[in-house]
Amino acid sequence: MTAVLCPAYLPNITYCSWMVAQQELYFVQDTHFQKQTYRNRTELHGANGKLKLTIPIVHAKNTLHQKEADVQIANTTAWQKLHWKSICSAYRSSPYFEFYEADLAPFYSTKATLLMEFNLTLIKKIMELIEFPLSYTRVDYDKDIHERMDILVDAKKKIALEVTPYNQVFENKNGFIANLSILDLLFNLGPNTLSYLENQVP
């Protein structure tokens, strides 16, 4: 069976650790979009603890039957401005924020339309920044040959991952918070992000 994955928004450490361990990566595009998942949610470490961000989506009449590739982002609110302000507030004082800021800021100033395209482009950029060139194939789901890794985007279920603690900006105030967005690793560990991901044990 070939494992297939749904693109997540600024995916967490578990998701990214799994991703860099794969010899080939397949993103599924025709399964049905599910609410309350990391498809359009991410978690950062803010001054007051875990900070959750959500990309608003257009709720079609048959939302439950929307295919991943068809889900549109709702741009009726300034969510990009809000998300970037939150990211800056959380990580402005981190060791590597200024190093990556210029690469990520455009994602929050250019209007995005389709959720899957936005997520994939953002994931590809982040993988480029950690020097893990991302090569992937978009596929249509076939239950006879594909194993769906939906647990990696399930916001309610937690995968047991032995996460090695690292220094976080607000750790002295809130303690270490595990399995946050890849941004938490990137801004705190910089060039060591990839080696960290490769050394996590599922």
Image (cartoon, helix red, strand yellow):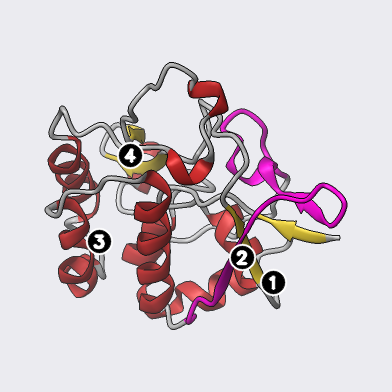
Counting residues from the start of the chain, the first of labels 2 and 3 encountered is 2
Residues under numbered marks 2 and 1 in contact, where contact means CB atoms less than 8 Å apart: yes
Q: Residue 19: which numbered mark, if any?
A: 2
Amino acid type of disc 4? Lys
- Dot 4, how many residues are within 10 Å of its Cα: few (below 14), some (14-19), or many (20+)? few
What is the spatial separation of the Cα atoms under label 2 and label 3, in whole angstroms? 25 Å
Badge 2 amino acid: Met
Label 4 secondary element: helix
Which of the marked residues, 4 or 1, is nearer the chain's N terminus? 1
Which residues, given as a range, are shown in magenta? 132-159
Pair 3/4: label in front: 3
Marker disc for residue 173: 4
Q: Look at label 1 and name its amino acid.
A: Gln
Is 30 covered by the magenta stretch? no
Residue 94's label in the rendered image is 3
The residue identified by callout 1 is 22
**Mark 3 Cα-neighbour bin, 10 Å: few <14, some 14–19, many ≥20:** some
Q: Work out which quarter of the rendered image holds the C terminus and state it.
A: bottom right
